[in-house]
């Protein structure tokens, strides 16, 4: 061990580039979407069983949990969709420079946040 090696990585002062947040959120929202598809299929199944099942699902969607999970799922879908398009464009060699990459990552995060906010107000 030499005396010049850093003793503290300074994790509190490290700042990730905006593209890293977009990338991490793409992974997290991918996992959230797997859960959301499962939940959506279960709700669809229950709603199609009979009239009471339909009423119960409609009430759940309009209930407090529906107002949390619904807009969260809408944000996750938007974040993953916009981030996915960005990933695919970069795979095709588009927007790969540092400036463009930062700009598109910021746009993805901002547009997804706006979509989630819209869902909060538009939720039934
Ligand atoms: C219900 C629909 C979807 C589900 C459940 C889903 C789920 C996932 C999951 C779990 C991953 C792996 C994340 C990781 O480990 O890094 C992933 C990656 C990916 N998804 Fe999706 N996805 C969905 C829709 C989409 C759509 C519509 C697009 C395109 C617009 C898309 C584009 C991508 C891309 C490009 C990757 C790879 C990202 C990378 O290279 O790191 N996905 N998705």
Image (spheres, rainbow, N blue to C red):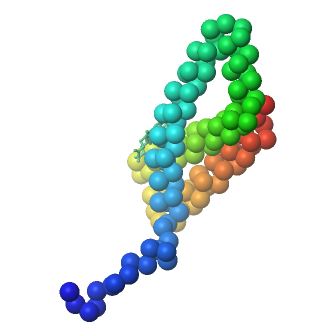
Of residues 25 and 46, the one nearer the viewer is 46
Of residues 14 and 66, the one nearer the viewer is 66
Q: In the displayed structure, does residue 2 sit left or right of residue 46? A: left
Q: Residue at x 68, y 35 (%)?
A: 65
Please, is residue 108 above or below residue 42 in the view? Answer: below
**Is any atom of residue 82 visible in this view?**
no
Residue 110: which quarter of the image?
bottom right
**Number of numbered discs:** 0
Residue 118: image x %, image y %? Answer: 74, 43
- The single residue placed furthest to the left in the displayed view is 1
Please, is residue 67 above or below residue 42 in the view? Answer: below
**Is any atom of residue 19 visible in this view?**
yes
Residue 114: image x %, image y %? Answer: 70, 49
Q: Residue at x 78, y 37 (%)?
A: 122
- The single residue placed furthest to the bottom in the displayed view is 3
Which quarter of the figure is the C terminus placed in?
top right
Residue 73: which quarter of the image?
top right
Which quarter of the figure is the N terminus placed in?
bottom left
Of residues 20 and 44, the one nearer the viewer is 44
Q: Residue at x 68, y 21 (%)?
A: 57
Residue 8: image x %, image y %? Answer: 38, 81
Residue 53: image x %, image y %? Answer: 67, 13
Of residues 115 and 14, the one nearer the viewer is 14
Please, is residue 110 above or below residue 5 in the view? Answer: above
Q: Residue at x 53, y 28 (%)?
A: 37
Please, is residue 55 above or below residue 115 in the view? Answer: above
């Amino acid at each position: 061990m030499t005396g010049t090696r850093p003793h503290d990585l300074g994790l509190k002062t490290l700042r990730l580039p905006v593209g890293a947040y977009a990338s991490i959120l793409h992974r997290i929202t991918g996992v959230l979407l797997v859960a959301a598809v499962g939940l959506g299929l279960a709700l669809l199944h229950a709603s199609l069983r009979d009239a009471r099942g339909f009423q119960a699902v409609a009430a759940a969607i309009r209930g407090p949990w529906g107002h949390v999970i619904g807009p969260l799922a809408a944000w996750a879908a938007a974040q993953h969709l916009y981030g996915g398009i960005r990933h695919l464009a970069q795979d095709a060699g588009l927007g790969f420079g540092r400036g463009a990459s930062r700009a598109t990552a910021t746009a993805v995060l901002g547009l997804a946040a706006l979509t989630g906010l819209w869902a909060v107000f538009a939720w039934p």
